[in-house]
Amino acid sequence: MEETQEPISTRQLYPYQEEAVNTIFNKLKEAKPNENILFQLPTGGGKTIIFSEIAKRYINHFNRKVLILTHRIELSKQTSDVLVGIGIKNKVINSEVKNLAQQTDYQSFTALVETLNNRLQEDEQFLEDIGLVIVDEAHYNSFRKIFHYFENVNILGVTATPLSSNKKLPLYQTYKEIIVGESISSLIDQGFLTENVTYSNDVNISTLKVGNNGEFTTGSHEILYSQAMMQGKLLDAYEEIGKGTKTLIFNAGILTSIAVYNLFKSKGYPIRYLDSTFSDRDRAETLDWFRNTKDGILSSVSILTTGFDEPEVETIILNRATKSLTLYHQMIGRGSRVLPHKKKFNIVDLGNNSRRFNLWQFPIDWKHVFVAPHMYLEQRYKDEWDYELENDYELPEDIKARFLNSSAEAFIVRERYLQCLRKGLKPQLVLDQSLDDHFGRIKDNAADFDEAFELFDLLSEEVKYRVKQFSKCINATNNYTDYQTQTFGKESRAKFTPVVNFFGGIAFFRKD
């Protein structure tokens, strides 16, 4: 499709969209060069429609050109279609566009940030007469590298979640102010987004590790979510809540996604999987299948969080955990589109995400988040630990079966810690109590000395979990946590040896 073709469609803005356009455009008319504005609106609120209308008004009012930057080729093409649809002569700058000798034919440009950055490195004058730069999904830090090429212009950033992808480079360093649009709950009340129900299945995610980027690592996700126990939880949740509905399953890793595909396929459910290794042709074929399959299930690895729109989706399954509020909102937003026959959509949370960030529609003070992002993030992570400290480690079913002769009473580290404080006892007593708890369970279930140490090894993850909880209670360093884990293991083994020797090796243990 040529970008300069006649308009293909027009549509009337909704009242809240019209209000947003007026507010933003009035700010732009008053703004000095290099004064930048950030606009927040939830996924599904029509950000592309709004900034396309702003582009049209800007072109007509200032007689200057507009550049729209995106981070994915799908978004660039979709944006171009909307611009052409409202009568703007737009040019898509993709990998095939090496130069723009004749630019007078165009009023706007849409470009992938990486492609345009390459062109500007070769020729800083690659684009002419740009007055306004619009940045879609402005929370991504990758756009910053291109801003220095555009002096004495205004930048309008648009995002659903005004939190920078790089915590060290907050958005307030680039944008002078934020304009907040309608909230999720307001758009639901007005019928522009679909009602939803969240089903949260508590999951022990203590084994997940955090990488240098502050997010849970893919590797630790793969280990946890590929386990039979977690696969079973996923299947049970689908069969109870989402069976028969068009369903999107978001995973953190390719191995997990393929395991999900194989599991559901073995049960006879219509499912495909999709990840970044797919060719453009295979990706298009898979998405066409999903759109045309009424009760289709698509297992993906977060690549459908932007640039994908399938209003028929009725169930979103978060088969992963995330520390990213942006990703949390993007994944859920895929199910929020409104249709006449679609009364609600389901959110199945298998990563404690709704506890970490609250429910998707929970009100957030985005102006506060914009000016003080670190305070907001720190509070979210504190809330996460407060939750996790209230739960004991959940043993896998096969390990749990080895401890049937002992009490299943939970050992809550935080409760024990607070009890010690109230009684004026040393906090270290908590670890001693945990040691006694493990010792008693092993004693009740081991038939001999060798089985005792086998059972001890089976409890190693629970040991690590409790030491980690204790370290959080006393605000200890990671080095202290590692030291205590090693010490705890040595003391546990030392506790068994003299008792076993005294009772002649096996008399101390249970009799079958």
Image (tube, rainbow, N blue to C red):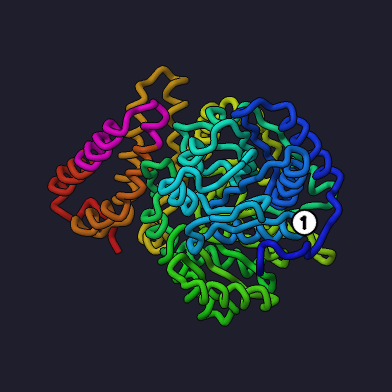
In the rendered image, residue 163, in percent from the top left (x then y), is placed at 56, 37
* Disc 1 target residue: 87
Give me the residue at 40% from left, 55% from top: 218
Instruction: Assess whether residue 242 is covered by the magenta stretch.
Output: no
Quick check: 256 left or right of 67?
A: left
**Secondary structure mostly taken by the magenta-highlighted segment of the chain:** helix
Give me the residue at 30% from left, 49% from top: 460
Quadrant including the N terminus = bottom right
In the rendered image, residue 389, in percent from the top left (x then y), is placed at 47, 37
> Which quadrant of the structure image shows residue 467?
top left
Q: What stretch of residues is rendered in magenta?
A: 469-490
Q: Name above or below for residue 20 compared with residue 368.
A: below
In the rendered image, residue 332, in percent from the top left (x then y), is placed at 64, 54
Local secondary structure at mark 1: loop
Kindly tell me whether residue 368 is visible in this rendering: no
Of the residues shown, which amino acid type is indicated by label 1? Gly
Q: Name above or below for residue 339 compared with residue 494.
A: below
Give me the residue at 56% from left, 53% from top: 111
Quadrant including the C terminus = bottom left
Quick check: 2 left or right of 305?
A: right
Kindly tell me whether residue 212 is visible in this rendering: yes
